[in-house]
Image (cartoon, rainbow, N blue to C red):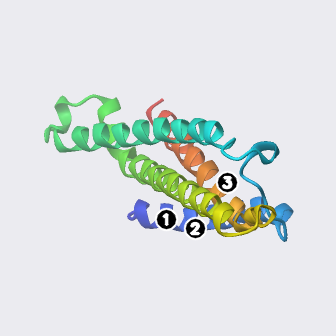
Amino acid sequence: MKHPVVIALGIAVVVFAVAFLICYWPRRKKTFDFDVRGEFGAFEPHAKRYQDLAKLVLTLATASIAFLVNFLVNLNADLKTRSSYSLRLEATSPWVIAFLCLSAMSLLLFLLFENLFYEDYVHSRYTRQPCDSKETYSGARYALNLTFGWTGLLWFFIAYVVLAYKLF
């Protein structure tokens, strides 16, 4: 295939739409409270765990992209001196890089929206009645955040499955 980035993006849109519907449908017409048992600030330890995992996978994805780009830039032009693994890695790199970029984008959006939604929630506690504060975290927002988090992990694992399959 000549355009793996365009094809991967098309696949990503379909996967995102399906994942969003799976996450949204059971949560439609509902609102959620960030804080566990209604204790103000109780979400902070949970958010830290979620963000640490997202940052770890984001770091691994971007480091993998850097490794593959460095590998491609420093390839030897003489095909006879290269190993079969080098040739296979060169052939599969565009797909793997595309999937890793999708992973990084999804995880960055997960981190962004989790923080934005939580800030909106926290500030609503001071501007509205306490019982109305959870109205800011709707089922659609929750589903959007879940979808970005899960698809970020999914694309990371798909990238490495494709890499392993093509190399071995």
- Which quarter of the picture shows residue 113? bottom right
SS at circle 3: helix
Of callouts 2 and 3, the N-terminal one: 2
Residue at 42%, 36% in the rendered image: 60
Q: Is residue 15 above or below residue 152?
A: below
Dots 1, 2 in contact, CB < 8 A: yes
Along the viewing direction, whichever of 168 and 120 lies nearer the viewer: 120
* Amino acid on which the number 2 mark rests in the picture: Val
Q: Is residue 1 left or right of residue 69?
A: right
Q: Which residue is mark 2?
A: 13
SS at circle 2: helix
Q: Could one spot residue 161 in this view of the protein?
A: no
* Amino acid on which the number 1 mark rests in the picture: Leu
Which circle marks residue 168 in the picture? none
Of callouts 1 and 3, the N-terminal one: 1
Dots 2, 3 in contact, CB < 8 A: no
Alpha carbons under labels 1 and 3: distance apart: 19 Å
**Residue 151, position in %: x, y?**
60, 52
SS at circle 1: helix
Question: Would you call the spot at circle 2 few (<14 residues within 10 Å), some (14-19), or many (20 or more)?
Answer: few
* Amino acid on which the number 3 mark rests in the picture: Leu
- Which quarter of the picture shows residue 131? bottom right
Question: Would you call the spot at circle 1 few (<14 residues within 10 Å), some (14-19), or many (20 or more)?
Answer: some
Which circle marks residue 9 in the picture? 1
Along the viewing direction, whichever of 116 and 91 lies nearer the viewer: 116
Q: Could one spot residue 74 in this view of the protein?
A: yes
Q: Which residue is mark 3?
A: 146
**Residue 4, position in %: x, y?**
42, 60
**Residue 82, position in %: x, y?**
22, 31
Question: Would you call the spot at circle 3 few (<14 residues within 10 Å), some (14-19), or many (20 or more)?
Answer: some
